[in-house]
Amino acid sequence: MSNDAPSPEAETPVPEGDHSAERRGFLNTLLFGSMSLLVAFGGYAVGRYLWPPARESAGGGEGQVEAGDASEFPVGAGKKVLYRGEPVWVIHAPFGFVALSAVCTHLGCIVEYEAEKEIWCPCHAAFFDLRGNVKSGPAPRPLPSYPVGVVGGKVVVGEV
Ligand code: FES
C-alpha cells in the first residue's frame, strides 16, 4: 500500500468563481458588527436603568408658574403644568384649587385626571382623591401638593 494518496482537500478542485472564503469573511464581519451593536445597545440600556438621568429643571423655574386665567378653570377643570421641572396637576376642586404632583408615588408614572374619575395612574391602577390621598391601588403615599392660588385673575402655582 502506498501512502502517497493526496489528502481529500487537495483533490477537491476549487471551482472558478468560488468566493466562499470572501463570503465567510463578510459573514464574520457582519456577525461581529451585529454582536458589537447588540452589546453597545444592551450596555446603554442597562446603564440608563442603573443610572437614570437627573431630572432637568424645565419650566417653572424656582418661583411661580401661571396655569392660566381663573376664568378658564370652572370647578372640575384640570390642567397639567411644569413646576420646578415636575409635572403638576392644577385642579379646581369643589373645595378650591389644588396643585398636586403628577408623579405617582408608586413607581413614578404620570397620573391622569378626569373630573369623573378623579386622579388615577395608568400604570398599575392607583387612584387618588382630589387632595392627593390614596384611595386604592399600590401607591404607598399621597401625591405631594404645592401651594396654589389666584393672583390678579391668574391661577398661580408656587408661593403666592
Ligand atoms: S406607578 Fe402608579 S400605580 Fe404603579
Image: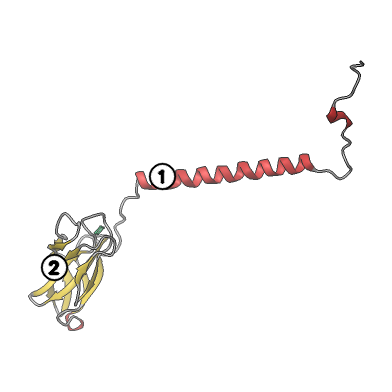
Front residue of this view, candidates 13 and 140: 13
Q: Sequence-wise, which precedes: disc 1 or disc 2? A: 1
Residue in the image at 34% along x and 48% along y: 52
Instruction: Please name the amino acid that badge 1 sits on.
Output: Val
Quadrant where the C terminus sits is: bottom left
Question: Disc 1 designates what residue?
Answer: 46
Q: Is residue 152 above or below residue 15?
A: below
User: Can you tell which mark lies on residue 117?
Assistant: none
Q: Quadrant of residue 21?
A: top right
Question: In this view, which residue lies farthest toward the front?
Answer: 1
Which residue is drawn at the image coordinates 21% and 62% (left, top)?
Answer: 126
| CA separation in Å, label 1 and label 2 | 36 Å
Tell me the residue that label 2 is attached to. 129
> For residue 129, what is the image quadrant?
bottom left
Residue 131, by quadrant, is bottom left
The residue carrying pointer 2 sits among few (fewer than 14), some (14 to 19) or many (20 or more) residues within 10 Å by Cα, namely some
The amino acid beneath tag 2 is: Asp
* Residue nearest the observer in this picture, 56 or 76: 76
- Return the x and y of residue 155 as percentages of the image width and height: 17, 75
Secondary element under disc 1, as helix, strand or loop, is helix
Q: Is residue 49 above or below residue 56?
A: above
Q: Ligand 1: which quarter?
A: bottom left
Is the N terminus in the top left, top right, bottom left or bottom right quadrant? top right
Residue nearest the viewer, comparing 77 with 7: 7
Q: Is residue 148 left or right of residue 47?
A: left
Q: Secondary structure at mark 2?
A: loop
Q: Position of residue 125 (x, y in %)?
A: 24, 63
The percent coordinates of residue 69 (x first, y second) are 20, 80
* x then y, percent, for residue 110: 27, 63
